[in-house]
Amino acid sequence: MSQRDSVSFRARSEDLSEREIEGAIVLLDERTWEYLHLNQTGAWLWKQLATDSRSCAELSELLLRQFDITSEQASIDATAFVGELQRRGLLVAEGG
């Protein structure tokens, strides 16, 4: 179990603009003026993090329920997604 599995994250809402376009989301970090384009799966994950704090393990479970993928792929995808958002400073860690 990685540290990200025990820590919950939520999407940062301050200094961040988002626009949904045909199922995808474009985020603008107003602190760095960097854009991030999230495909439909990324947009779906982002919405999960915007509505509630979630751990990587919880995101992985949600992916399994929503999409036809293996538990290994769900875990890899959730961990990579959270890692990228953390690297960009778009998440707030809560607990763990």
Image (cartoon, rainbow, N blue to C red):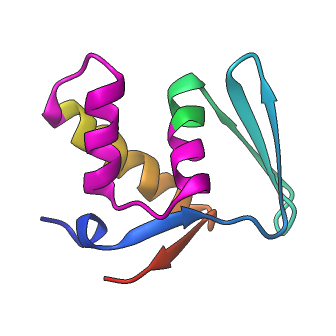
Q: Is residue 81 left or right of residue 18?
A: left
Residue 17 position within the rendered picture, expressed as x and y whole percent measured from the top left: 85, 52
Residue 41 position within the rendered picture, expressed as x and y whole percent measured from the top left: 50, 28
Q: Quadrant of residue 31?
A: bottom right
> Residue at coordinates 26% horizontally, 35% vertically from top-left?
74
> Residue at coordinates 59% horizontally, 54% vertically from top-left?
51
Q: Is residue 4 left or right of residue 50?
A: left
> Residue at coordinates 52% horizontally, 59% vertically from top-left?
52
Identify which residue, 72 or 59, lies in the foreground: 59
Q: Is residue 28 above or below residue 19?
A: below
> Residue at coordinates 54% horizontally, 64% vertically from top-left?
10
**Quarter of the image containing the C terminus?**
bottom left
Q: Which residues are magenta?
A: 45-72
Residue 54 position within the rendered picture, expressed as x and y whole percent measured from the top left: 41, 60
Residue 77 position within the rendered picture, expressed as x and y whole percent measured from the top left: 33, 38
Magenta span has 94?
A: no
Q: Main secondary structure of the magenta part?
A: helix
**Quarter of the image containing the N terminus?**
bottom left
Q: Is residue 46 above or below residue 31?
A: above
Magenta span has 53?
A: yes
Q: Quadrant of residue 85?
A: bottom right
